[in-house]
Image: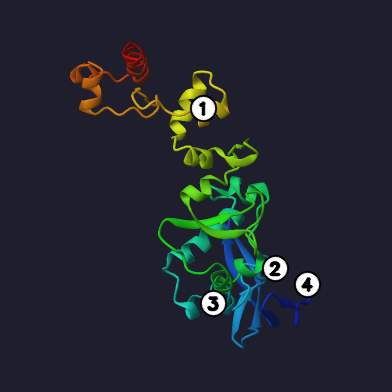
Amino acid sequence: MKKDFINQKFNKWTILKELEPKKYVTNKRNVLKRVFLCVCECGNTKNVLLENLKRGISKSCGCLIKENSGIRTHGMSKTSEYHIWNSIKERCNNPKNHAYKYYGGRGISFYDKWENNFIEFYNYIGTRPSKYHSIDRIDVNGNYEPGNIKWATRKEQSRNLRSNINITINGETKCINAWCDVYNISRATVKSRISYGWDLIKAITHPIRKNSLSYNESDINFSEEFLALLDLEIKNMKHKNNDNFIIEKLKQLVKSKL
């Protein structure tokens, strides 16, 4: 016996009456599927498959999409703010998104009122200050929600990474990038010093000798002036494709100059 769905509500649809079933071909078999005449909350009517109602494939006549996105009212669907908002939804809700494992996969969610309404989100966060700004979560393990998001540059966000290390110097705690700014030293130099066995704090605070040669193994400047300074023939360097060979050769030459 068929179940009666008359007057039942599915999202914005309310079922009015059952119509003649429609024939569909599934796996080379003819299948009859139940169809109902439904009325939307906005007043529009439409014939809808029962399975689409149950699975939430059809939630309204189309008015729900307009309400959720606000596309017809805000005129901002081509702005960077809108694309950022949409990207946040994707990485929090879509398991097929390449970044989902870092967000939705870790339990990070998008505030309900913002997820379903771009204007609510935009009114809270405001206009993007520049093309260099994106959304930053203040608590990197927290959700995209009121009180936990702000516009920030890439440099500002790098200080808020889960992988960043906070250290205390003279009673004050900052991340490594911030301390590098304070002591006017590049992170590459700090990394190089640590690789030679330096203590982390000393690697940051010890001043660079003005007349010394310094280099970063992962970012060597192959300018003609630099190569000439090391008495290395440019042609001999250019035909070498082995980075390890180049680095070791430079180490030897630099040490001989110090």
Q: Secondary structure at mark 3?
A: helix
Task: Tell me what residue is drawn at x 58 percent, y 39 percent.
Answer: 164
Residue picked out by circle 3: 66
Measured along the vertical axis of the image, is residue 13 above or below residue 102? Answer: below
Observer-side mark, 1 or 2, equals 1
Q: Which dot, 1 or 3, sits closer to the camera?
A: 1
Q: Position of residue 71 (x, y in %)?
A: 49, 75
**Marks 2 and 1: in contact by CB < 8 Å?**
no
Mark 1: secondary structure: helix
From what the image shows, is residue 150 above or below residue 66?
A: above
Q: Is residue 250 left or right of 167 when viewed as pictured? A: left
Secondary structure of residue under mark 4: loop
* N-term-proximal mark, 1 vs 4: 4
Quarter placement of the C terminus: top left
The answer to whether one can see residue 116 in this image is: yes
Cα gap from disc 1 to disc 2, whole angstroms: 63 Å
Instruction: Name the foreground residue: 234 vs 35.
Output: 234
Q: Which mark is residue 203?
A: 1
